[in-house]
Image: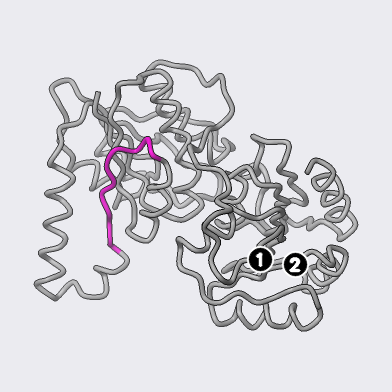
């Protein structure tokens, strides 16, 4: 059986799609699974050795140079790659026009099926027009967890029930190949940055938490100039904290993979640490906890909710609980 997964973005959503691979192979161990994903997230999907072939999608880059013949040639090459294999199932678990077009371009075998979402979840960017590319549209409850949605769609199409916790297929910590900026021993990482200000936890909360963790090193990650300034402000009040250099996607994943403790707001890197089964405290301030909370390991503690950020005392109690498991 040949299967194509279409989930191109964003970081957290690609991550949350990974358990589909283990589910499918648990019930169809001889299946070959390919994946179309934005080129920036290829390295994340590649960490799962059970994905046979990754087809990079570069729409974010192509949009900047659609007038160039080189870009048009690259787009033609992409669709050629999508059509190279004939598939028995094509799954679009993103539900956008762009992912529907990719699904539409894919070739299916005689009797093959193109399966997608019949509806979006609350607050999602679901585009109903994507259904025109489906052979079958699977409905899900609008409040279905982000990890469960893709799993349920595949289970309904392939006729199996979900009876196990999500398996992201990711490796354990890599202590032998630590980059120069990473401490040799245990460290905590704060994923404090996010694009939407309302999802952030107050700086004074991070400072109080960081001081309570001393002398454990605290690493501060950032992804934009504004987040770097925020990290520098936090580090100025934390003698045990350091601001990391600009990290590539591979390096950011390595940071999450090896953390002895990760504390972060509702953002992709926090969820990556949770998928690696690291001790994680997920902080929810202005997004619904039900949608993305880490609920597959007792090493993940979810605090706060939309409009109800947690207090420092709650976070420190969770730190004590997780450190007691170490």
Is 83 placed left or right of 13 in the picture? left
Is 44 placed left or right of 273 in the picture? left
Q: Which mark is residue 183?
A: 1
Query: Residue at 40% across / 34% down in the picture?
Result: 118
Q: For residue 136: magenta?
A: no
The residue pinned by badge 2 equals 217
Looking at the image, do the residues carrying marks 2 and 1 touch, with CB atoms under 8 Å apart?
yes
Secondary structure of the residue carrying tag 2 is loop
Residue 23: percent from left, percent from top: 45, 26
Comparing 255 with 41, the one in front is: 255
Q: For residue 57: magenta?
A: yes
Residue 47: percent from left, percent from top: 43, 46
Is 164 placed left or right of 191 in the picture? left
Per the rendered image, the range of residues in magenta is: 49-59
Q: Earlier in the sequence, mark 2 or mark 1?
A: 1
Find the distance from the CA under tag 2 to the CA under tag 1: 8 Å
Comparing 166 with 140, the one in front is: 166
Residue 132: percent from left, percent from top: 26, 39
Q: Residue furthest front?
A: 176
In this rendering, which labeled residue sits more in front, label 2 or label 1?
A: 1
* For residue 109, above or below residue 234: above
Is 313 placed left or right of 92 in the picture? right
Residue 46: percent from left, percent from top: 38, 47
Secondary structure of the residue carrying tag 1 is loop
């Amino acid at each position: 059986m040949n299967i194509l997964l279409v989930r191109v973005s964003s970081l957290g959503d690609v991550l949350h799609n990974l358990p589909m691979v283990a589910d499918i192979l648990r019930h169809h161990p001889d299946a070959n699974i390919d994946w179309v994903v934005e080129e920036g997230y290829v390295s994340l999907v590649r960490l799962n050795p059970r994905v046979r072939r990754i087809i990079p999608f570069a729409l974010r880059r192509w949009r900047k140079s659609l007038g160039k013949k080189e870009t048009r040639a690259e787009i033609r090459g992409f669709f050629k790659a999508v059509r190279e294999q004939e598939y028995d199932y094509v799954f679009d678990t993103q539900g956008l026009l762009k992912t529907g077009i990719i699904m539409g371009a894919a070739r299916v075998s005689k009797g093959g099926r193109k399966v997608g979402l019949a509806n979006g979840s609350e607050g999602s960017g679901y585009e109903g027009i994507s259904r025109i590319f489906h052979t079958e549209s699977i409905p899900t409850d609008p409040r279905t967890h982000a990890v469960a949605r893709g799993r349920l769609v595949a289970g309904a199409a392939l006729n199996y029930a979900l009876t196990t916790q999500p398996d992201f297929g990711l490796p354990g910590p890599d202590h032998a190949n630590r980059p120069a900026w990473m401490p040799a021993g245990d460290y905590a990482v704060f994923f404090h940055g996010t694009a939407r200000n309302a999802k952030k936890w107050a700086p004074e909360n991070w400072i109080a938490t960081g001081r309570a963790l001393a002398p454990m090193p605290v690493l501060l990650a950032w992804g934009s100039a504004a987040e770097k300034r925020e990290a520098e402000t936090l580090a100025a009040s934390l003698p045990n904290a350091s601001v990391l250099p600009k990290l590539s996607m591979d390096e950011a994943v390595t940071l999450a993979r090896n953390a002895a403790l990760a504390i972060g707001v509702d953002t992709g890197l926090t969820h990556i640490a949770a998928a690696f089964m690291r001790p994680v405290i997920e902080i929810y301030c202005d997004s619904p906890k039900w949608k993305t909370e880490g609920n597959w390991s007792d090493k993940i503690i979810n605090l706060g909710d939309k409009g109800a950020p947690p207090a420092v005392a709650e976070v420190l109690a969770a730190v004590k609980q997780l450190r007691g498991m170490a």
